[in-house]
Image (cartoon, helix red, strand yellow):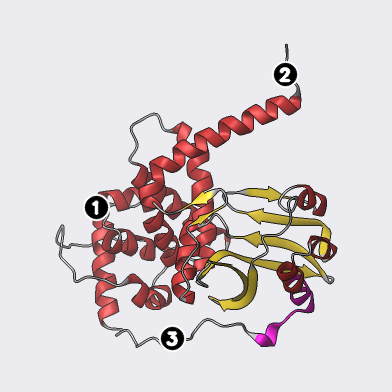
Amino acid sequence: MEKSKEDQMLSFSEKNRELRAEFNQIIEEFRGDLWSYCRYLTGSPWDGEDLFQDTMVKAFGSIYQRWHPTNPKSYLYRIATTTWIDQCRKQKRIVGYLEEEDVEAEHTTESFDAEEALEYLLELFNPRQIAVFLLKEVFAFTAKEVAGMVHTTPGAVYATVRRMHNQLADNPIREKTYRLPSFDKATRNTVIQAYLKALNEGDVDKVLELTSERAQNEVPMGFQEFSREEMRSGSMRFGLPGFRSEEYFLWGKNVIVVFFETEDGTRMIHDIQYQEVENDKIVYYRSFYFCKEFIFAAAEELGVPPQLDKPVVNWCS
């Protein structure tokens, strides 16, 4: 008996989930460092998360094209690097040319704190130089591996790293000033305030009333919904989580942080989300519920632990 289109789609989705689960197992040990690389490369946790997600999608979607044994770590970093350089080209940024010179085949360097010197990397160097430096000096790839990722030669990798070290030495790193994360009250939006109130009261109808009919709800690594009705019958079918939600100013963006509270009163980050508003309606939702690396980095920034065991997710191991 021939399957209906609905049954075919369901079968396809189930097979896709199985393949995705197998893919996730293969790359699990590399995810944390890869996320950090994307963050350093773009200079922003937000842009880094976007690059990380793009890398995951491309890696999962194109691995079938590999006919030869593949090192999964190099494969992921290669895709992240080429994706970022392609994005820079589309933005008409100068990605740079890597020149060789007569240098020693290898030289030792002092340990390098990428996060501490990140703003200097972004100020002083072009995207390809930054990628070379991070891959070679921070993530410890060989010059040959780096050359393959950025489409250059090993000699150019050695020369680029040496020149960058010299330039960094001539530009001492200034002490960073740290500002505690907070909510920027100057940018309050009445629609978001109404949404936050409805969220804390568990009022699904009010949330949907504030939502545009064709709003998009994006939950990376989880699901997508493309209308208010899909949200009603999908993610909000069984109501709202009923946890306390508060606004914060995180890495330059106003967000809503959803907290889970244990019996002893300990608060943990359950979710981080933001919305876009047009014409007094929420037209776009984004939730980072499934984004482990992003949630962990935000938890460190906010000084609040992440919730490790939550519905459909277990990050305890």
Is 292 magenta? The answer is no
Whether pointer 2 and pointer 1 mark residues with C-beta atoms closer than 8 Å, the reply is: no
Is residue 43 at all visible to an observer of this figure?
Answer: no
On screen, 14 above or below 272? above
The numbered mark, 3 or 1, whose residue comes first in the sequence reads 1
Residue drawn at x 38%, y 78% is 120
Q: Residues within 10 Å of mark 2 (few under 14, many from 20)?
A: few
Q: Position of residue 99 (x, y in %)?
A: 31, 61
The numbered mark, 2 or 3, whose residue comes first in the sequence reads 2
Residue marked by disc 2 = 3
Total labels drawn: 3
Is residue 240 at all visible to an observer of this figure?
Answer: yes
Q: Residues within 10 Å of mark 3 (few under 14, many from 20)?
A: few
Amino acid beneath label 2: Lys
Residue at mark 3 to residue at mark 1: CA–CA distance: 34 Å
The span shown in magenta is 185-195
